[in-house]
Amino acid sequence: MKRGTEGKRRPVTIHDVAREAGVSRGTVSRVLNGGHYVSPAAQTAVNSAIRRTGYVVNRHARSVITGRSDSVAFLLTEPQERFFEDPNFNVLLRSCTQALAAQDIPLLLMIAGSEAERRRNLRYIAAGHVDGVLLVSSHSGDPVVSDLQAAGVPVVACGKPLGQRTRVSYVAADDRDGAREMVRYLYASGRRRIATVTGPADTPGGVERLAGYRETLAECGLPADDALIAAGDYSRDSGEAAAELLLRRSPDLDAVFVASDLMAQGVLDALARAGRRVPEDVAVGGFDDSPAALSTRPPLTTIRQPWDRISTEMVRMLLAMIRGEESAAVILPTELVRRESA
Amino acid sequence: MKRGTEGKRRPVTIHDVAREAGVSRGTVSRVLNGGHYVSPAAQTAVNSAIRRTGYVVNRHARSVITGRSDSVAFLLTEPQERFFEDPNFNVLLRSCTQALAAQDIPLLLMIAGSEAERRRNLRYIAAGHVDGVLLVSSHSGDPVVSDLQAAGVPVVACGKPLGQRTRVSYVAADDRDGAREMVRYLYASGRRRIATVTGPADTPGGVERLAGYRETLAECGLPADDALIAAGDYSRDSGEAAAELLLRRSPDLDAVFVASDLMAQGVLDALARAGRRVPEDVAVGGFDDSPAALSTRPPLTTIRQPWDRISTEMVRMLLAMIRGEESAAVILPTELVRRESA
DNA sequence: CTGAAAGCGCTTACAG
DNA sequence: CTGAAAGCGCTTACAG
């Protein structure tokens, strides 16, 4: 008897609502699905019956018929655990969850860290258990992209997927333009030996931000100098190592444009250890405007990536594709955030 | 015609498999659900038919009958966005996802940051769309706990939920014992003026770690001194402020036990600004062993929370409750991680 | 506009 | 051990 109270009561079905409203189940279903071809009277009766009974649709039963699951996967392809250390990832995941929730669509989180997980997730997705996937993948030529497309599943990537043979929808910040704006700002504040720490050459941020840096140097009439360029992998430690290399090769540098805030943290540490004051001796500009940018000393001047808009656009685009629209790409503008490091 | 290639092919059903294997659909279903009452011959025929056809079960159709969804929610109740800044949260979310994936159970991520979201998520969950929920809530007396229980949904919390009238299952690290171990270690290394920065008084970590600190002081014969205790809210900034307060009130302190690594970061900054060397002048011990502990200068000596085990246990326990087992609590041991700050 | 009926893909007693 | 049948909760042509 005790258990009976705790246990789930028999859920109310469309049948109960129909009886309560004095109509057929078909009519109830019609108001549930948009209310077309339903008289105002029936409409009202059904709605109030729904309220009285506390009815809520059984999505599984619906899915069996419609063939859609009304759910979406957030798929993370990342052998490195880097994404989870990256504050950017958090805000992306959070805003996607919320943008989807606003449409009453649950987000299934999937992580493909190994080949086995990749296969499992792919099987799940290809079986039609989700209507589409929000993809976060940093690999150039990641096979998961084409596998998904081959399975006929709508996909929207975060950032432009590199090395794909086919067109894939994506939403990205304007990396190149953001880099330009930062370097211009550094130049405008009087810096003339502007170095850069890049991201990996097989990521869009790695190539585009470097391109923006180079363009702006040329535009400002500053000489191109490879001794001012060091590569990182977006991790904090790689930023630190890159800065040490830069200081050795170009001790006269007076600014560094770093392709991510996390790496900029490392750069700041290396600079401090080398006895350089920031921003007096060396100005440092980051990229992302992640929470990390606020916790550095001094706080980081950086380029904000519009993560909220990125997620909103990803969700909007994916939903459109699920509805049958064509693929597309959206590039969102970035914004310079002035703090104290430059 | 082009579209035809891209579009989803008609999915293969249990019917196709039955025909291919030369048995009835009932038999196919039986092998799918454990293979009881199936002859080895039929077993083999069906399995190979499944392989040939690439059949994968339609979970929705199954759910309509079984009443289970074979999915689980990860529910985050957090108006502050603190959890997403906290590296601990990431590893928890990641390991839960993977522990679940190993059982082929998808994780639905839900965030209840506002009252409206809380209601929506609750409605979704109560409608039986998930079989159980993994709850991450930091609020003392969070109503979501009782709402979930009232709906008859199995729940396992991360950390002991404070201020609940009913029993709720949870998995937690042994906060008190971890605190004891750290303070003992500080004492053993010769410190005698050991301060502490606590977490909020309405969180388990806030009360238990402080209790462990107090007990150990007494056990070591050190006097209790409220001037050595300052409160934080787990944020980095609060750690910094607490350390400043402590330095003002007890300039002679020679060690600080900080109830989280993130706060310890702030403490380290405040100490550096005050010209105290770590660990020479002041030893600093953290709690969590989050990624943050590695990025401080010097790297943080801390107490490791066994997040992998916590997630594994949470998942195991939730699955057991879904199967009908009683609720329970699991306390997992922590471990001292020696690095350079103490 | 609306009811009766068929059917989605699956599971589960029920007879054998 | 196995097939035929009923049924899960819902949607959707199909007649009116």
Image (cartoon, coloured by chain):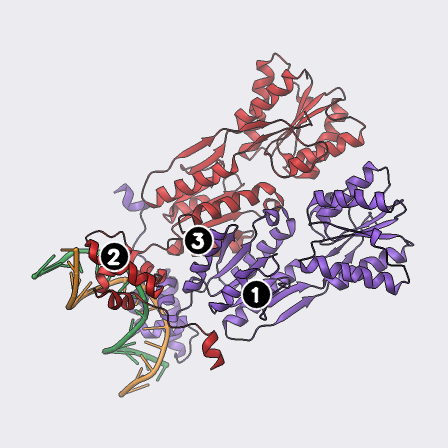
Chain colours: A red, B purple, C orange, D green
Q: Is residue B307 above or below residue A272?
A: below
Distance from Cα at disc 3 to Cα at disc 2? 29 Å
Q: Is residue B309 above or below residue A1?
A: above
Pick the quarter of the image with the N terminus of chain B.
Answer: top left
Residue A292 placement: quadrant:
top right
Distance from Cα at disc 1 to Cα at disc 2? 40 Å
Residue at (77, 44) in percent of width and height: B267
Q: Residues within 10 Å of mark 1 (few under 14, many from 20)?
A: many
Q: Which mark is residue A106?
A: 3
Q: Residues within 10 Å of mark 2 (few under 14, many from 20)?
A: some
Q: Is residue B299 above or below residue B14?
A: above
Residue B63 placement: quadrant:
bottom left
Tell me the kind of residue under disc 3.
Answer: Pro
User: Taking B120 as reference, is B312 left or right?
Assistant: right
User: Taking B247 as reference, is A116 left or right?
Assistant: left
- Where residue A181 appears, as percent x and y from the top left, is 57, 22
Name the chain letter of the residue that bears numbered label 2: A
Tell me the kind of residue under disc 1.
Answer: Val
Tag 3–tag 2 contact (CB < 8 Å): no
- Where residue B131 appears, as percent x and y from the top left, is 47, 66
Tag 1–tag 2 contact (CB < 8 Å): no
Q: Nearest the camera: B116 or D1?
A: B116
Report the residue marked by disc 2. A44
Name the chain letter of the residue that bears numbered label 1: B
Secondary structure beneath label 1: strand
Q: Nearest the camera: A87 or B237?
A: B237
Tell me if I can see residue A223 in this picture: yes
Q: Which mark is residue A132?
A: none
